[in-house]
Image: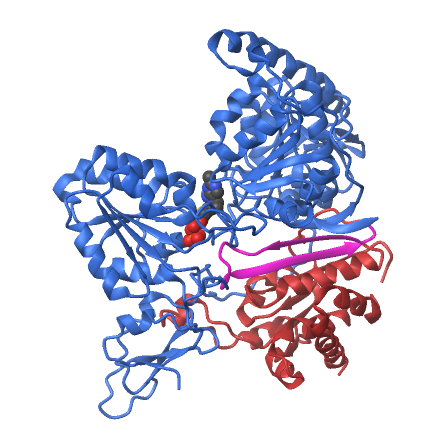
Chain colours: A blue, B red
Amino acid sequence: MKELLSGNEAIARGADEYGVRLASAYPGTPSTEILEYIGKRYPKIKAGWAPNEKVALEVAAGAAYGGSRSIAVMKHVGLNVAADPFMTLSYTGVNGGLVIVVCDDPEMHSSQNEQDTRNYAKFGKVPCLDPSDSQEAKDMMGEALNISETFDTPVILRSCTRVSHSMSMVELKDRVEGPKELGLKKDPMKFVMLPAMARRRHPLVEQRLKDIAAFAETFPFNKVMMGDESLGIITGSVAYLYAREAMPNASFLKLGMVWPLPEQMIRDFASRVKRLVVIEELDPFIEEAVRLMGIQVEGKSLTGLCGELSPEKVEKALTGASTAKSIGGIDMELPLRPPNMCPGCPHRATFTALKKNKVYVAGDIGCYTLGALPPIGMLDNCLCMGAGIGIAAGLDRSLGDLAKGKAVAVIGDSTFFHSGMTPLLELAYNGGSTTVVIMDNRITAMTGAQNHPGTGYTLREDPTISADMEKLAEAFGFRRIRTVNPYHVKELQDVVKEELSADEPSLIIARAPCALLKTERILPDKPLRIDENVCIGCKACINTGCPALEFVKIEQPAEGDKRKGYSRINEALCVGCRTCFEVCKSDAVKEAS
Amino acid sequence: MSEDRVYNVLIVGVGGQGIILASDVLGKVAARHGYDVKKNEIHGMAQRGGSVSSHVRFGKTVSSPIIKMGEADVLLSFEQIETLRYFPFLSVDGNVIVNDQKILPPAVFTGKQEYPPDVLERIREKVPNAVVVDGIHVAENLGNPRVVNVIFLGILSKYLDIPASTYEEVLKESLKPKLVDINLKAFHEGRALAAS
Ligand SMILES: Cc1ncc(C[n+]2csc(CCOP(=O)(O)OP(=O)(O)O)c2C)c(N)n1
């Protein structure tokens, strides 16, 4: 039977069909849905959100050591967090198959950088499979698990936004269990990476890479498709589909395994075509390897290093023009439509209170990063998950009086449990006067509402512990810990002011559930309204950036009316969070009648 | 319509308008009809408010999951300026279906920028037979403002060669039972609007 599945659905399905017994992940676009589908559809797989990717990989590694087929799932930058176990897992090898599913994000549709996971495969000396569509994504899960067990290595299954989020037809099969015997097996020479053991493992890793390279020559997903011999294209991932669309008659070497590369296959293909071009997104990974073989090849000089490819980009790179007859653009400046915090978002209230204190904000990653955009403009840096607290500490300690009482760190709840606990400990340990605000909206919102160790529920919505931030900070040695409802903007504003003036590290927890959450709801879901005759048109409410507010221009003012306009509430959008009420200078915001 | 051709439908709008459901149904309909299907959507970072686009392609065999710029046969847009944003995807021979709705972007609702006044005129300059329908109005007359997306699916279906019964089957399977009737009504209302 065939079904239309997204790449992420197909990867989840593949995990089930090929006998995966455990899956662990931390959310991150475009990888998030994989574990969500496993949670909902495949009860035979033990699955759960890990606090971060490093832990996810370690949990999966444990399962593989015990003989289970297992997967760890993350977005590209997640592998940075998991890089430490990843690099040495390559040495210990596995037992049951272990696949690390990593999703790249060319074009940075929802990411902070455009790193290319294939480099990690080379760095860690592990194989990397690179599917183009959903069928391949599912099939390659099976191939990856087999390779992992055959060659005793973790394997990267690399996806990207356009593979993970594209749908295509997939042939379905039934689940088959993995081949390995399960159990605790002592084998210190293989699994304990003391220097003496690691020294014996390293040559095995080098030999393994050679063996897999030989295997790659006959790997069925490395395919030559000869067409017109004047142009030969080496490609993989979704770039293969773009290239096929753009140049249907060319000859192709499609690589399903992008590390290690099948050198002989590449040499043969190169010798059969007149012009050889590598079409790949992100880094010149294949191109440089081909050039190192002494083969003349083009690639990034045509397609560029930044952003994603597309059928027309590939066509233009190869032929200089597109054959498509576009109706063309319209010569008009269109207002942009950037993502925005939702109506009723508690983060908006928190930023409003911070803005009143005119502070510098060391930021972090989550929905609250959108606080950097106008009209709020209250987030001054954002590096990677968990970085904000450390950065604020560095500013505080190095600048002394220049920063004292003027800077805070903000961090979301999921980010706090991901990588904010250790920097908080650093603050308690090394002192200073940094103020940290945890914007606790009780969920991992940015990636579409996933549970985490603070929400009280698991991946499958089973009740579990809810880690206590206040007690944690207390245990770390914090003496100043305040919990505030951010919708009480004035109160939060005062609390921030007090904590900024303290001479020791302090923690403020601004706690209110995400406005999209149906559970734990504290929002009244009753719209407010603005009395347009009382509104003085000062825009204090408008400058909170709430999409439920609109500034209505007054074209012909009545006599004596000096206003340029007034604010109006869109009742269809307003959920009654009262942030506009809190900032209104003229008592114009009223309960809806 | 030849056997080998690939149909390219680009559906665009703003998060929360039901675009993903509409394109999911279309994809399943094409698959049920026996076509090879590829479909891709980009839905911005946040839950709401961002620009959303969904590419649906079907035919005997389809390679790329995204439409080549300039090869969309139909551009179905749920919001006025989003139509213009994605115009370069449309083929010179393509059709445009527009929901006559304005959703104000941040720079507009905060009073920093104007919403372009003559969007529909600009669309018609390039595509004189563009179909413009006030979907919310039609939906409210049907008794449920949330079926705008399925009304437009009905209009769109008139530009494609798959029978209405296939859409009906997929709608029945994809929706909660209590929403099936109103959505089938909305679908046929859309088809009637396209015919008139
Ligand atoms: C290492 C890494 N993993 C995952 C992500 C994707 N990601 C970005 S922010 C975020 C969590 C946001 O949750 P939270 O901190 O609770 O803030 P909220 O969005 O709820 O405001 C995730 C999972 C990332 N950017 N980097």
In-front residue for pair B44/A305:
B44
**For residue B20, side relative to residue A336 (left or right):** right
Q: Residue at x 49, y 57 (%)?
A: B46
Residue lying furthest left = A401
Q: Identify whether A426 is placed above or below B67.
A: above
Residue lying furthest bottom = A559
Whether residue A185 is visible to the viewer of this picture, yes or no, is yes
- Quadrant location of residue B129? bottom right
Query: Percent from the top left, x then y, of residue A123?
Result: 53, 22
**For residue A155, side relative to residue A365 (left or right):** right
The magenta-colored residue range is B36-60
Q: Main secondary structure of the magenta part?
A: strand
In-front residue for pair A436/B132:
A436
Q: Quadrant of the N terminus of chain B?
A: bottom right
Q: Residue at x 60, y 59 (%)?
A: B53
Check if residue B44 falls in the magenta segment.
yes
